[in-house]
Image (cartoon, helix red, strand yellow):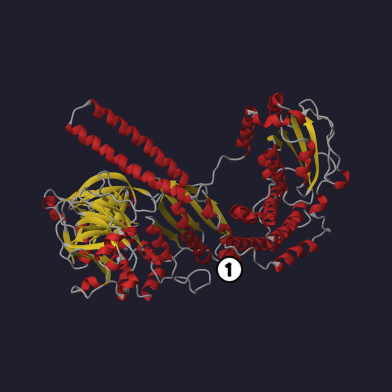
Amino acid sequence: MRGPLPTIIYAGECRITEMSQDAIAGQEIEASEAKVQHAEDRQTVVFRLSGESYGIDIFRVNEIIRMRDITPIPRTEAHIRGLVNLRGKTIPVVDLRIRMGLEVVAETESSRIIVVDSEEGQVGIMVDAVNEVVTLDGQQIEPTPALANDDQTEYVEAVAKREAELVTLLNLDSALAA
Amino acid sequence: MSAELDMSQYVDLFLQEADEQIEILERETLKLEEDPTSERLQVIFRAAHTLKGSSRAMGFSGMAELTHEMENVLDQLREGHLQVTTEIADALLQCQDDLRQMVVSIGEGNGDQADCSALVAQLQGFINGGATPAPSAESTAPSASKDEDLALCPDLVETLQQAAEQAPIRQLRVTVNSECVMKFARAYMVTGVLTEVAELLATVPSVEDLEEEKFNQQFLALFQGGPSDEELLTQLKGISEIDSLVLTPWSAQATPELTVVANEPSEAKEATPASPTAPTAPAAPASKSPAAENNGAKQSASTTGQTVRVDVTRLDALMNLIGELVIDRTRIAQIGSDLGSKFNDPNIDALEETVSHIARITSDLQDQIMKARMMPIETVFNRFPRVVRDLAQKLGKDVKLELVGGETELDRSVIEVIGDPLLHILRNSVDHGLESPETREEVGKPRQGRVLVRAYHQDNHIVIEIRDDGRGIDAEKIRKKAVEKELLTKDQADRLTDREALQYIFSSGFSTAAEVSEVSGRGVGMDIVRSNIQRLGGLIDLETEVGKGSRFVLRLPLTLAIIRGLLTRVGEQVIVLPLGSVVETLLVEVDSIQTVNRNEVIVLRGQTLPLVRLNDMFDIQSREDSTEDGQYVVVVGLAERRIGLAVDGLIGEKEVVIKSLSRFCGDVPGISGATILGDGNVALIADVNGIVLKESA
């Protein structure tokens, strides 16, 4: 049914930034021992949650859809926002902001649902906006620093430095685990 | 070139066939004791024979050996040299168990491992102990020397004649060795070669019959074109277990002179020069004969049922697609009517017309797919006779099991899960329900106990009834037991009606059998049975009369994929209530809602029903105006229990496609699934049975 690569539906404001290896190598050259274990390129989908940038591996992403009506499911955990209709299938949507103790901001035109594969089937993740897809060089990725917000630590896999911004790379499995 | 069979790719096919044959064996053997007709023996013999042939062909020698011995015994029975006794029937059934095990083991890739030497010895013992010295199967086989009369039917002759105008036809008479166990495979190889190098027009008997081994030792193959006689014979001689091959030019008038050849090397003569075939032959394969092909098709239609095996996952995928189509259909219809109310345009009428046509087609399509997923409940019933027989023997009871309505069809999703609960009830009936023959005689009943399993359709449901004429269930005993097990206080128990008391046999930890037997009565049965049936959206009910017997009635939906639902509004949300559980809908005055022990109740025709507000239950904010003109209440029921569900509004009745809640959400109390409405929004389906059980407990 679906090809090996994920289908990504972009809204107009999104752009793909494929950074060539040379360009990235020019930015950061100091390779430390600690970084070696992350030394592979990763294509990452970067999105915004409560004003911060987060990233997940592009191979986990099935598609990105516009916000739509979510039917709440009573008596489930707070971060499970409800069910949406994805072309005749019903899939649950989670709000990682609630899960990670972030401030929940109101939906806007740029809000999206990222549909990912989880162990329990397809799951949608509500995000404030999807920025871009970037190739992160292994050298840009650092292990998780001690975060002020403890709620987040268990869901974070690593942090990537990009130009002026930090991208928190999520460990999707633990972020979605029950 | 050679038609070599790659065995591995046939294993699946073999296993499937083996399953079918074993099922036939078991079914017929069970009937054998009561009704040992020679036709029945013939059927059993044929099944054993087919198994022997195919297992030998696949190289499963253990299985082949066992079936061979079965065949010998069956042959003796068939010839009347042996009588059907319980020992023989037991041994045959034991064989079937062993065969099943082998099939499982083969399926797991472990070959046919099973030690059946004792069984083989037992079977041989029957024969040796039998009256007459065994005339073995081999010796009864007709001698191969004489040509069998293989007549061509007039239709075939006619089409062949037409074909012969294009190119000459040759006829090959093949005699298969009488010892050959896999005649069909040899025939297959011969026809395979002919199809490859020449154009095979027909065989006598037909190809289908050949495949099913419906021929003695000889068959004819008629073909056009292909290499010269000598070349062809050389190729065909490579096939083993063939006694002779005789190639002749064919003509409609008469069977012409032989053109030759036996497979014995000493006698191998070459084809007589004769025949104008050789020169024209190479050109011939190009000219297809439609007449002959049509004829072939006609033949196959008459001999085999027109069925195709389809993987269930494909049917499931189809069902999902239909589900989406149904959703879109509803959606288009809604858009159509929205447009219709806004604009006045003849195109909209046309649209509505088309929509209603699409609606008709999709619902036909849905019906057809549903039908394709339907299976007769026989597939479940077939397990019963054996179980009951073994059980009766073990318990020393005499039981007559009647199965009625096996042809009743229901969705395979239901079939898959209904087997075990039914079997459990059946076991209970034989074990606890029926008395021993002695007791039965004492109370003036026939020694033989009767258990009837009956299935039939009623409305959109299937009803399965299991009835026995045993001792029945004493409500008084149940009350005592329930108090003993501390499920009830003495006071509570006394207030229960008999019917209510009986419901306690479905509670966990409940068994009325005086002593726990191996068969049933560990007290973990009926509650699981009931919860399984309720999970299917079904109901189970029990009627009993002490001394006369009991009757379990199961009511199940025909399918688990699509249900009719009552759409209700709760706050801003739509909640679907399965129509099967809905008893009635009411609009009651707000004042008439009373409270008992701080629980709301309504009184309906003198009966007090607990009232459950769905918006409280589901934490949904009610609309403020909702109680203005009274409170909508949907009365739902499960067996005898009734409760009222308070909702904010009633929307209507609709067929909905059930989608399971994602595993991601876990088990949500009160919700059994979700569905997609015509407007594309998701609505939740309430687990009415669960709510009733919880609220009325």
- For disc 1, the marked residue is B395
| Residue B467 can be seen in this image | yes
Identify whether B380 is placed above or below B524. above
Identify whether B93 is placed above or below B492. above
Q: Is residue A178 left or right of residue B570?
A: right
Q: Position of residue B243 (x, y in %)?
A: 81, 46
Q: Is residue B679 left or right of residue B211?
A: left
Nearest the viewer among B8 and B70 is B8
Location of residue B108 (image quadrant): bottom right
Q: Is residue A113 left or right of residue B52?
A: left
Subunit under mark 1: B
Location of residue B19 (image quadrant): bottom right
Identify whether B394 is placed above or below A130. below
User: Label 1: few (<14), some or many (≥20) within 10 Å?
Assistant: some
Quadrant for the C terminus of chain A, please.
bottom left
Q: Position of residue B204 (x, y in %)?
A: 72, 36
Dot 1: element: helix
Q: Is residue B41 left or right of residue B440?
A: right
